[in-house]
Image (tube, rainbow, N blue to C red):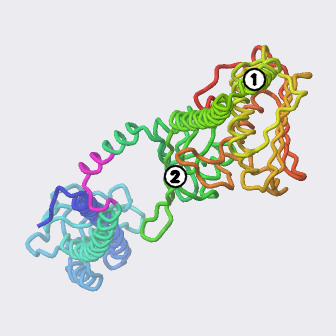
Amino acid sequence: MWRLRTIASRFLLAVLGILLATALIGGYLQVQLTKRTFDKQYQDRARAVADVVAQIPQIAAAVAAGDPSHIIRAVANRIAKSSGASYVVVTERTGVRFSHPTPALIGKRLEEPVAVLDGKDHVGIDHGSLGRSANGKAPIFDASGHVIGQVSVGIVERRVAGAVRQQIAEIALYSAIALGIGVLVALFMARALKRTTFGLEPAEIGSLLQDREAMLHGIREGVLGFDAKQRVTIINDEARRLLGLTDTVIGQPIDEVVPPGRLLDLLTGRSEGTDQAILTEDSLLVANRSPVVVGGRDVGSVVTLRDRTELESLVRELHATTGLANALRAQEHEFTNRLHVIAGLIDLGEFDEAARFVTTVTRHNLASSEDLRARIGPPVVAALLLAKLTVAAERDIDLVITSSSHLDGADHDAQSLMTIIGNLIDNAMEAVAEQPAPRTVIVTLGNHAGIRISVSDNGPGIAPETVDAIFMDGYSTKSSRGQARRGLGLALVQRLVRRAGGTITVLSEGGTRFEVSLPVREPTSAVGRPMSVKERA
């Protein structure tokens, strides 16, 4: 039993119904056309026989004389038999019959008027005494050209019907063959449809579509789908938000939607890997791309995007806090050593030496802090440099803030400066961390015609072929540091510098030097706008 509720069964029955209806209607129309065609053919044939009989001189003479010898009947029957006509009826002008297949009607008058008195041939369907027939009538003329009689030749319907039945048999055979082929094609298409829909029925497909739409637009991850030609087939609301897309992008090639860059490389598969970090203008995204293979064929891909801006900011703030805690721990260790010295001097009774030691240490610390605070205007930048000095001392790195450094932060965004300077110093210290002593990082700050920041180290340097790559988000030669993602610091620095309208250059000769130049901030400058969570990271 067919399950009529299945889409394949419905499709099969619909196709079969269409084929059957088409065959029946087409067969009926073909039969009617064939019937009319045969009627016309037999009418023309009957007229031709009638013309031949009407032109026989013997017939014309007999009609004119009233057929005293009764020869018309014999000639008419002989011609009817030889021509295949059902009857040949010869009448005189008034309609009295001289011949007829039924002898009893000879000598009697026709029921209908004589049609050829106008001197012309006539054809049609005659419903006479022998039944329905294809009829042809021709006039008989005398020597002077007057109509003196009529020849009526008919082929009865049974002959036409026999020809039509033969055509019907051929039409039925053709229709049966076409219907059989249609059934096979319908079965094939039904199976193909079932394979295409994975055996799912319309209600199930509709339910899956609703579930897919609800899930696609309800999750907090961006989802994009592409076909084999890299055209967008699926995109949810979160992906539109993360990528800043507002127009309809379904059906468009991805390279027409996303500008060239690392994000486009990942979406198209040119950049491979899992959990790849991508830094956009407003967000930090973690992307994963998975190819879609059906039946061994690559039919496209799916990309998921997660917004890690706030989480990454918290991780980096935690890392910064950990760094400050380590700096405080280093200071506590140093202060403990100094307290031990003071306690030892007191135990030895060297009170004057203890007092001089305390005065010297206090004066040195205050001098260093106040000198840096006097030359570095923004308090957060000065605090950052002091913390970096402590961390560098603990790691046995000589961090030098040059004596010529001066920074007036009244006209600049301190948060942006802190991000730029902090990332550059961190990269420099990591570059020299594995080097043998001496390990040196030199920082120079200036306010001449804008802000100038220079951070150099005596590390291994940067290969010329990788200079451009170091500013690419996600690029790093170092191993991951806990939950904090590598390869974002320099990319973030470059974006901040570019937004401010500045420049950043890299020199690598006997180490590495980063030089940043920021113009004086205008009221509408990007540096002056509120910092995003990502930039504060």
Q: Residue at x 73, y 31 (%)?
A: 496
Q: Report whether residue 137 is seen.
A: no
Q: Which residue is denoted by mark 2 in the rendering?
A: 288
Instruction: Kindly identify the residue that appears in the image at 85 percent across and 37 percent down.
Output: 515
Percent of width and height locating residue 31:
27, 66
Closer to viewer: mark 1 or mark 2: 1
Residue that extends furthest to the left in the rendered view of this protein: 104
Q: Quadrant of residue 361?
A: top right
**Horizontal relation, residue 334 to residue 202: left or right:** right
Q: How many marks?
A: 2
Which segment is the magenta one?
A: 197-209
Local packing at callout 2 (Cα closer than 10 Å; few below 14, some 14-19, many 20+) is some
Q: Is residue 204 magenta?
A: yes
Q: Is residue 304 visible?
A: yes
Is 484 displayed left or right of 376 in the figure?
left
| Relative image position of residue 227 (x, y in whole percent) | 52, 55
Three-letter amino acid code of the residue under disc 1: Asp
Mark 1 surroundings: few (<14), some (14-19) or many (≥20) residues within 10 A: few
Q: Quadrant of the C terminus?
A: top right
Residue 490 is situated, as x and y percent measured from the top left of the image, at 72, 42
Q: Which residue is the site of mark 1? A: 352
User: In screen coordinates, is 159 left or right of 444?
Assistant: left
State the residue at coordinates (76%, 13%).
523
Q: Is residue 450 left or right of residue 30?
A: right
Q: Are marks 1 and 2 in contact (CB under 8 Å)?
A: no
| Kind of element beneath mark 1 | helix
